Image (cartoon, rainbow, N blue to C red):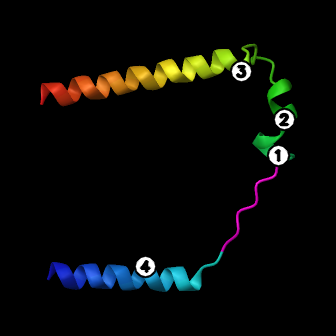
C-alpha cells in the first residue's frame, strides 16, 4: 500500500514538473536587493561586520540550544 502511494506521489510530482517552467532572475537594482535600500533605512546604524557578527552569534546560540536538547534525550 505504501509503495502505491509513493509511486502515485512521484508520478504526480513528475507531472507537475513537466507542466511548470520558470526562470528566476535576480537583479541588484530593484526592491530589497537594491544597494541603496539599506542606506536609506533610518535605524540601520551598524556596519556590515557588526551585523554579520550578530547573525553569527545568533546562529551559534541556536546551534548550542539544539545540541543541548539532543544531549537531554
Residue 23 magenta-drawn? Answer: yes
Earlier along the polypeptide chain: callout 4 or callout 2? 4
Task: Please give left or right for residue 21 compared with residue 32 in the image.
Answer: left
Q: Residue at x 56, y 17 (%)?
A: 54
Q: What is the secondary structure assignment of the residue under circle 3?
A: helix
- Circles 1 and 2, Cβ within 8 Å, touching? The answer is yes
Vertical arrangement, residue 14 with respect to residue 72, above or below: below
Please tell me which residue is depicted at 31% across the width and 23% down the height of the picture. 65
Q: Residues within 10 Å of mark 3 (few under 14, many from 20)?
A: few
Residue located beneath label 3 in the image: 48
Please identify the quarter of the rendering in which residue 31 is found.
Answer: top right
| Mark 4 element type | helix
Which residue carries the number 1 mark? 28
- Residue sitting at x 81%, y 52%: 27
Distance from the alpha carbon under mark 4 to that under mark 1: 33 Å
Q: What range is drawn magenta here? A: 22-28
Give the image quarter of residue 3: bottom left
Mark sitting earlier along the chain (4/1): 4
> What separation in Å lies between label 1 and label 2 (alpha carbons)?
7 Å
Find residue 55 and name its label.
none
- Please rate how many residues cluster around mark 1, counting C-alpha atoms within 10 Å: few if below 14, some from 14 to 19, many from 20: few
Disc 3 and disc 1: Cα gap in Å?
17 Å
* Mark linked to residue 13: 4
Amino acid at each position: 500500500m505504501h509503495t502505491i502511494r509513493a509511486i502515485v506521489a512521484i508520478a504526480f510530482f513528475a507531472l507537475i514538473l513537466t507542466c511548470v517552467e520558470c526562470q528566476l532572475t535576480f537583479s541588484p537594482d530593484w526592491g530589497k536587493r537594491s544597494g541603496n535600500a539599506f542606506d536609506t533605512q533610518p535605524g540601520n546604524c551598524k556596519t556590515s561586520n557588526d551585523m554579520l557578527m550578530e547573525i553569527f552569534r545568533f546562529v551559534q546560540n541556536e546551534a548550542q540550544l539544539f545540541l543541548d536538547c539532543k544531549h537531554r534525550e
